Amino acid sequence: MFNVEVQYQTLSQYLVEIKEVFQYLSDLRWIVAEIARVDSDKNGNYWFELVEKSNGEIIAQAGAVIWRGNSSTVQNFYLKTGVNLQRGLKILFLGKASFHEKYGFKISIYQIDPSYTIGEMEIKKREILLRLEREGLIDRNKVFEIPLVIQRIAIISSESAAGYEDFIKMLRDNEYGFKFYTRLYDSFVQGQEAVLSIVNALKQCALEYENYDVVVLIRGGGAVVDLQCFDEYEIAKYIATMPIPVFTGIGHTRDKTVADIVAHSSFKTPSDLAKYILERASNFDNQIENLKNSLFSKVKYLLNLESSKINNFSKNLKISSKSYLDRLGLNMSSLLTDTSKTVFKKINSEREKLFKYKNLFHRNTNQVLRNEIIKINSLSNKAFMGLSKFLTESRFNIVKYEQFIVEKAKNLMNITTLYLHQITEKLRLLSPENILRRGYSITYCKGKALKDAKNVRNGDIIEVYLYRGKIIGEVKKKEDLDGSLKLF
């Protein structure tokens, strides 16, 4: 198309010239940037995408590389921080602009200052804790009361995590034979997807919290970088706002993560968490056993005490009744004796008067004498009649009083005997054997008496104890009822 000869270069020749210009003009500088992406190739080179952000917006972006010959910088960073170079980390590095005919513009990284990144991580962690404190979330989950027995457990973990396997094995194979209901919300617990995965699991647990006693977040150890997700604000917020207690067993020996701090309780390992749950169940089981023994002892003591009281009351009643009748008989005999003495004393007095009148009027006429004798006989007859009447009335009263006393004693004995029968009948009706005789039964599941259908699952074997014998069966269906059960 053109007739003139054109001087030209190949692309590689041109880019080599640019490369030489970059090498001549650029020098080493300490630079701060955030890692947006990092990869390594089979040759041992590390490729980075670096960014600078302002208010969440990227305002600068460049590629960077750590060449294979300088790869020890990566290992040194990990040894000093325990963190792998990864997305989201801010780093302070010594770098120089370079240009490569194949890879284009890159910043060559020669050194990375580990102390800067550690400081940035701690600053970020402190900022998150201060934000949670301002929002009143640090101790929010800690106000919930832990159930006496933790049986229904929501687990947020990875199904392949060793910590999850240890946790389940300890609960399943416990020496006490306790049974637990667990449900796994399978989640990533490390890597870039961990935060979103764990947050989604926490949201689901919050929607279904009525089905659980606690939520446990477990992992099972790992490098510091693997635990970084547990310092994120989103995870901490959803832990703090969970409507039931949240336990953590992340498995680490360094300072607590933000998730540990906002959780209700934190444990170093999933095994420590499982041990705690088993210890609470064992303590509750021991309390129930002690209460049962104490109740049996108290009932036995009360029955013996009431039986002793009844026997003593019966003996005292017999003795009191006999003593009362004996005193009444003595009083009646004394009264009869005193009455006889009074009557005879009156007769003797009248006789003395008679003899006196007889001597005084001895000289009167026979008529007067006869009149006086008639009067005397009349008085004597009246006296004897009065005495006879008095004695008759006295005997009648004595018989009447005796019958009254006997009747009262019989009534008292009948009332006392009826009261004794009533107490004896109450004791008999309240005895466990008689309760079973009336058609009631006691149901046991795995050695424990059942009081709530929630404590048994379909497929469990139960033993029903009757008045005579027992029935062994398998639970096919159950109904959980809130409140008291209406039998009729």
Image (cartoon, grey):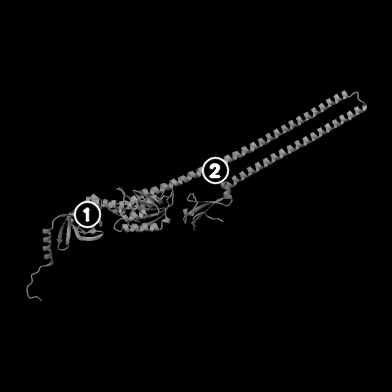
For label 2, the crowd category at 10 Å Cα-Cα, with few meaning under 14, some 14 to 19 and many 20 or more, is few
| Residue under pointer 1 | 91
Quadrant, the C terminus:
bottom right
Is residue 476 in sight in this rendering? no
- Out of 285 and 64, give the one closest to the viewer: 64
Residue at coordinates 66% horizontally, 35% vertically from top-left? 320
Q: Name the kind of residue labelled 1 in the image.
A: Ile
Question: Viewer-proximal residue, 153 or 245?
Answer: 245
Residue lying at the far left of the rendered structure? 4
Sort mark 1 into few (<14), some (14-19) or many (20+) by Cα contacts within 10 Å: many
| Image vertical order of residue 358 relative to residue 478, above or below | above
Tell me the amino acid under the disc marked 2: Val
Residue located beneath label 2 in the image:
299
Dot 2: element: helix
Q: Nearer the viewer, mark 2 or mark 1?
A: 1
Quadrant of the image occupied by residue 343 = top right
Judge from the rendering whether residue 312 lies leftward or rightward of residue 279; answer left or right.
Answer: right
Residue 419 percent location from the top left of the image: 63, 43
